Amino acid sequence: MALPVAFFGVFFAWPVVSIVDRGLRPDGAWRFGRIGETLSRPDILDVLGFTVWQALASTGLTLLVALPGAYVFARFDFPGKGVLRAVVTVPFVLPTVLVGTAFLALVGRNGLTDELWGLRLDTSVWAILLAHVFFNYAVVVRTVGGLWSQLDPRQEEAARVLGASRWRAWRTVTLPALAPSVAAAALMVFLFTFTSFGVVQILGGDQYSTLEAEIYRQTARLLDLSTAAVLTLVQFAAVGAILGVHAWTVRRRETALRLVAPERTARRPRGAGQWTLLAGVLLSVALLILLPLGVLVERSFAGPHGYGLGYYRALGSLDESGTFLVPPLEAIGNSLRYAVAATAIAVLIGGLAAAALTRRAGRLVRGFDALLMLPLGVSAVTVGFGFLITLDEPPLDLRASWILVPLAQALVGVPFVVRMMLPVLRAVDERLREAAAVLGASPWRAWREVDLPMVRRALLIAAGFAFAVSLGEFGATVFIARPDRPTLPVAVARLLGRPGELNYGQAMALSTILMVVCAVSLLLLERLRTDRTSGEF
């Protein structure tokens, strides 16, 4: 536990506490009255209200659209099911900046809907809600569908034999078993949309702002650390409560059910109703997921003189606007190098943490487990800005070092690594380790020859997710990435922030490249994942 605790203490707790300290104690005396003053401001109340409202609306809309998809993936067997499962998961690992860019190409100025029907949604809240559904569709399909595929259908069939209608059998047998899983998925969607930043930053503009976007505005534009500190505390408390409820629903799901192998529950659709349902889900996937990505790719090739590679070629040279100190194309290499380093750090820290959580129990370890999830509950903007004001003096003067970006990205990757490796490590029989020790193996050799072969697949999957998450991290990176070393998400945001057709086309081209890299990472990850693994992210 020593190295993970030190890592989180130095690179997470210290920057966040420093931001809060500077905001609430600017002259050496605590100003707790600023909390009440900030939370009573009409503009802040509007931000809080919109944050909660859009998170609730996004969650409800995502469940409405994705639950039929969860059923189809759980109960139906059809050609191309494995590929389609990977396709619907692609949005989850895409950077939020890219998601916003894709919907900007679809419903924004000169977008597909604007050209066909003169309809623009980028100035309305609907663009944000649809982008959130696009981003979180896979959360519901994986979480609920993963459990649904393992529920024994004979229980529902027994209720039908006893006289229950199809609706009553589903409502009284299947729904109660699925309820904890649906609640867990809803809470995760609410968490992701409550802390939304990149999507709101691109599609919301100055009209709509969430807590995360407002923290960025108060910190980067207005330099109002007092307001930013209060909003950080509010977001931290809210997300902590969400994670607590989520942990409770997961425990209920883990202990309440008897499951069967997924291959025993899936079958080909029967009857017109089931085929219609399958067709409806395929259509929703095509319109909601494939269409925005397809429009993004199309816009990257649609130059002013017809289709071609003009925007891609322009990525290799500097423009006269001074947007970049280096050609935008260099952001690809920067992102890959940062992501590889961040993945190595996340796997090391997360692997050690998962091993520690496996071997010991008690309040200390449970508190340590909660500590590992805190980066999901604190504004990435706060962490990034905290890096700038804390890691600026020897012996940790890292402001000019390239390692600063991977360290921030690894903070987001560690929770994924822990959550994926922990169940597998806990499943390793302790008697195997004891037998190896009796035969003279050292603890290191016992781990290498007993644990490692069993967790190798989970380790590779965790590394793949950490790589994808690091590749798309934006909230902290936008603060600490050097102007001459931008990452792909930062470069896309800079291009979108500049007027002109060339900048817009280059943003589409860079976003397409980023999408391809993320999709390839996910497809490789999907080859490692088997249908027997849980649908839990």
Image: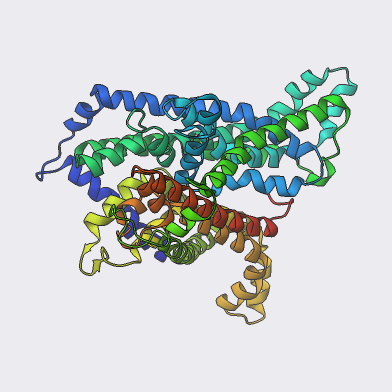
Q: Is residue 30 left or right of residue 397?
A: left
On the rendered image, what quadrant is the N terminus found in?
A: bottom left
Place of residue 354 in the rendered image (x, y in percent of width and height, measured from the top left)? 53, 59
| Residue 329: % across, % down | 43, 61
Q: Residue furthest front?
A: 305
Task: From this view, report whether residue 271 is shown above or below residue 152.
Answer: above
Residue 361 visible from this viewpoint:
no
Q: Nearer the viewer, residue 404 or 355?
A: 404
Q: How many marks?
A: 0
Q: Quadrant of residue 14?
A: bottom left
Residue 274, quarter of picture: top right
Q: Residue at x 76, y 28 (%)?
A: 277
Q: Residue at x 38, y 38 (%)?
A: 201
Q: Is residue 382 above or below residue 480?
A: above
Q: Position of residue 85 (x, y in %)?
A: 69, 45
**Place of residue 116 in the rendered image (x, y in percent of width and height, measured from the top left):** 56, 28
Classify 507 as above or below 241.
below
Residue 142, above or below 483: above
Q: Residue furthest right?
A: 161
Residue nearest the observer in this picture, 11 or 29: 11
Q: Which residue does the image show at 67% across and 80% down from the upper left?
A: 439
Q: Is residue 393 left or right of residue 308?
A: left
